[in-house]
């Protein structure tokens, strides 16, 4: 049964140096608050997994938390490159970063295999692609029934999966809706799962017309932490919109190592929690 914990305790309990950690959320419900707590606790040598590493992974990589990235597309959505990711790959700062690149469909298949307890996943994909030349985990097998050539990928089974959701009840059952991506599969595939939520309620009830409602029972979740606004600057359907100004301004912050370090030290390492982080942005361009 899931524990209800403060975020600091939830991360300290679940995330260890050297872990494989997936922070999932597809454009929506991205767990920024949890990512910041990992930075505050100075976790190191993490293998970070994410279908679309964006700004939160730029921050984790630049803060020195990661030694490897497993991903399928990386960038600042609608803006451009992730400069801390590029610096790590191209120049080894703040440390070397190994890459394992996939297609979106491949990542989703690998998560589904992990969630199902299978050793690998299969898909019609990668044929004609250059990705298998650079990613040795992509293999091809022959279907024993049809003879068709299929791509096989090892299951993704993170040590820890972290997601953000709209609600949880006091027993630790979690509800999310909207663009749900692979959050469900990431949680089911993980050894340990941490969920941050907008609110903890007595009873879970989905809003009318809520799309794609997913319920995660408390027995698949290790801990739940209430963090209002915990997906900022991404959005949480029914709670707040995406903060586009933050993404635009991040391009300026992340381009220069010294500017990035000063920002992380002031707004993440120098704040006690996500609420203080939000207060630290008041009056800055990143809080527009």
Image (tube, rainbow, N blue to C red):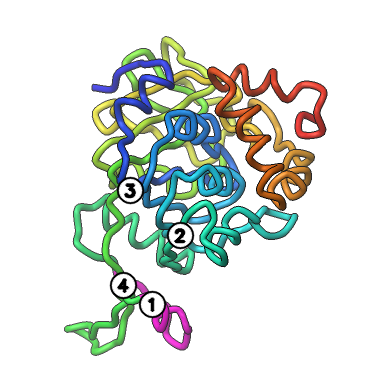
* Picture quarter with the N terminus: top left
Give the foreground label among 3 and 2.
2
Q: Earlier in the sequence, mark 4 or mark 1?
A: 1
Q: CA distance from mark 3 to mark 2?
A: 14 Å
Residue located at (66% from left, 42% from top): 260
Residue underneath mark 4:
137
Provide the residue designation for mark 3.
20
Residue tagged 2: 97
Helix, strand or loop for disc 1: loop
Q: Which residues are magenta?
A: 122-135
Label 2 packing within 10 angstroms: few (<14), some (14-19), many (20+): many
- For the point 41% across and 30% down, the residue is 195
Can you identify the residue that label 1 sits on?
124
99 displayed left or right of 13: right
Asked whether the beta carbons under mark 3 and mark 1 sit within 8 Å of each other, the answer is no
Q: Secondary structure at mark 4?
A: loop
Viewer-nearest residue: 104 or 256: 256
């Amino acid at each position: 049964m899931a524990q209800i914990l403060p975020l600091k305790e939830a991360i300290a309990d679940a995330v260890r140096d050297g872990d494989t950690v997936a922070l999932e959320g597809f454009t929506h419900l991205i767990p920024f608050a949890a990512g910041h707590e990992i930075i505050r606790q100075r976790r190191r040598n993490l293998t970070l997994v994410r279908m679309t590493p964006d700004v939160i992974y730029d921050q984790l990589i630049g803060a020195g938390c990661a030694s490897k990235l497993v991903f399928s597309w990386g960038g600042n959505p609608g803006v451009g490159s992730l400069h801390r990711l590029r610096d790590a790959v191209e120049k080894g700062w703040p440390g070397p970063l190994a890459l394992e690149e996939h297609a979106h469909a491949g990542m989703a298949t690998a998560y589904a295999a992990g969630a199902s307890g299978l050793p690998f996943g299969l898909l019609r994909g990668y044929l004609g692609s250059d990705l298998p030349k650079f990613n040795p985990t992509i293999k091809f097998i022959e279907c024993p029934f049809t003879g068709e050539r299929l791509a096989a990928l090892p299951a993704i089974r993170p040590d820890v999966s972290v997601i953000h959701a709209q609600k949880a009840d006091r027993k630790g059952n979690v509800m999310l809706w909207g663009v749900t991506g692979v959050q469900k599969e990431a949680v089911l595939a993980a050894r340990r799962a941490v969920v941050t939520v907008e609110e903890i309620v007595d009873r879970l009830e989905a809003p009318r017309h809520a799309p794609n409602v997913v319920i995660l029972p408390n027995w698949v979740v290790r801990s739940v932490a209430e963090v209002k606004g915990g997906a900022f600057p991404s959005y949480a359907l029914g709670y707040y919109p995406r903060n586009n100004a933050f993404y635009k301004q991040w391009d300026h912050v992340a381009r220069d190592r010294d500017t990035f370090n000063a920002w992380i030290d002031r707004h993440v390492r120098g704040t006690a929690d996500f609420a203080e982080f939000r207060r630290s942005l008041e009056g800055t361009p990143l809080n527009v």
